[in-house]
Structures are given as C-alpha cells and as structure tokens.
Image (cartoon, rainbow, N blue to C red):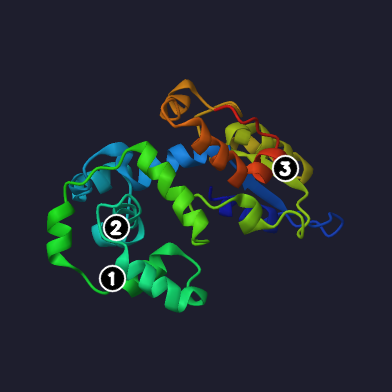
Amino acid sequence: MNFEWLLEESQANKNESVTPRAAISVRHPLRRLVSAYRDKYLGGLPIDAYNDTYRKKKYLIESWYVRWYNYWLPVLISSGRVSSEHLYATYNNHSSRFDFMHELIITAYGGYDEILVKNFQKATFSFEQFINHVLWTHELKLPDFHWISVFKTCHPCFYHYDYVIHLETVKEDVRDLLSLTHIQDPDKYPFPTRHVTKEGTSSDASYFANIPSHVMQMIFQIYALDFKLFGYSTYV
C-alpha cells in the first residue's frame, strides 16, 4: 500500500519536539496469496485475457511479456507443463546469482519464444497450482516479492517499528498514527473504502476449500512468523 501522502504530510508538519517514528504495513498472509492469485494469475482466466482492455479496466501497467516471464512461465514450469530442464541446469550452475525467480527464468529461457507463447497463450492457472508454485519458489529460495514473508523482507526483529498498520483495519490504524504525529484533519486523506476483518472474508476462504491439509500446513509454516508477530489467526 502506498503511504507517500502520509510521509509528505508528516514532513510538512515537522515538529522538532516529536521523535521520528517507523511504521510497517501488513496484510493477512492467506489474503495476500488470494490477492496475488487474482492479480497476477487473473483469478483463473486464460492469460490471453490480459489485453489492453483488461489492463485499462484494472488500472494495470505491466506488459503481457513482463507477466509472461515473471509469473506465467514460472508456473507452467513448476506445474510440469513446460520442461524444467533448462531451469534446473541454470540453477545448479549459477544458483548464487539469483535472488528472485524471474531472474532465473530469463537467464534459463533467454529471449522471447514465439512458439512457446503461442502454445500456451490460452493457459489458465488454478489456485491450487498457484499455491504449489508458492511452495516450489520457497523450496528453491527464489520467492516473489508479492508473496514472500513480510518477516523476511522487513526484518521486524532487526528494525524497530513503532506502529503496525494492518490493511484490514487501515482507516483506524492510520487515524491513530496521524493523531500521534499531530497531523490535522485526518478525514481529508485517501483511505481505502473497503473494510475487512483480520480473518478475511468468506470469498477469500473459498479459495482454500480444496487445498489439501498437508499443503496448508506447509503454507502455515512459511508464514508462521507473519501470523505470530502481526496478530493474525490461521483462519481466512
């Protein structure tokens, strides 16, 4: 979530007697996964639906080919629809060179493969395939920023955060933060209109209904510290 407006306003209202504060924005781990699936994998639509009309409707700027290399081709590989031979050969020879999956994909599979794209331009991805892909990227230690554990990216045990802003209660949390930073008239700022509880919604829960219990246990293990540190239950 973008809080640049909050930073700009706090700087404009600087008070030297106020101690600088740090805040972290978090979201329920399982709801993050549902959101990533809906966004990056079109909620199960064929990937050729990601056209100019779709992007304009959703206010998206990533090109089709960025999505192809960053998200769709990796799942085609992890689900076995595209051979993983090149990927593992590259990974075994140069694993220390890569921090994220898309770096490995581009190195292993090179430039644009017109035949491969043509063969899979109507590919779809189920939520279970996406979840298995998340586990695969975790096993290879090449996660994606959109679903990596917040604990691993923001290091809350090493950096002191004075405030935790939960996306599910963002209006209340940011209002509290504004009052403590002496910013006037908090109601004039651009808060999201959707309000959800920390346990998510029934529509989010439905995505996990058919995920095997042993797979869910592995997901819980990956995000265990996010659940614990930020006060989330394992229900969604």
Question: Circle 2: is it few (<14), some (14-19), or many (20+) Cα within 10 Å?
Answer: many
> Residue 91: where, in percent of width, then height?
42, 71
Which one is in front, 73 or 41? 73
Give the vertical position of 156 relative to 96 (above or below): above
- The residue positioned 52% from the left and 76% from the top of the image is 96
Q: Are marks 2 and 1 in contact (CB under 8 Å)?
A: yes
Residue kind at label 3, given as amino acid type: Leu
Q: Earlier in the sequence, mark 2 or mark 1?
A: 2
Q: How many marks?
A: 3
Give the vertical position of 130 relative to 148 (above or below): above
Residue kind at label 1, given as amino acid type: Tyr
Question: Circle 1: is it few (<14), some (14-19), or many (20+) Cα within 10 Å?
Answer: some
Q: Give the mark toward the camera: 2 or 3.
A: 2
Q: Which residue is mark 2?
A: 73
Q: CA distance from mark 2 to mark 3?
A: 33 Å
Q: Which residue is mark 3?
A: 229
> Residue 18: where, in percent of width, then height?
84, 54
Which one is in front, 140 or 42? 140
Q: CA distance from mark 2 to mark 1?
A: 10 Å
Q: Earlier in the sequence, mark 1 or mark 3?
A: 1
- Name the outermost residue toward the right: 17
Which one is in front, 218 or 55? 218
For label 3, the SS is helix
> Residue 232: where, in percent of width, then height?
66, 33
- The residue positioned 43% from the left and 42% from the top of the image is 131
Q: Earlier in the sequence, mark 2 or mark 3?
A: 2
Q: Which residue is mark 1?
A: 109
Answer left or right for 33 relative to 76. Answer: right
Residue kind at label 2, given as amino acid type: Leu
Q: Are marks 1 and 3 in contact (CB under 8 Å)?
A: no
Figure quadrant of the C terminus? top right
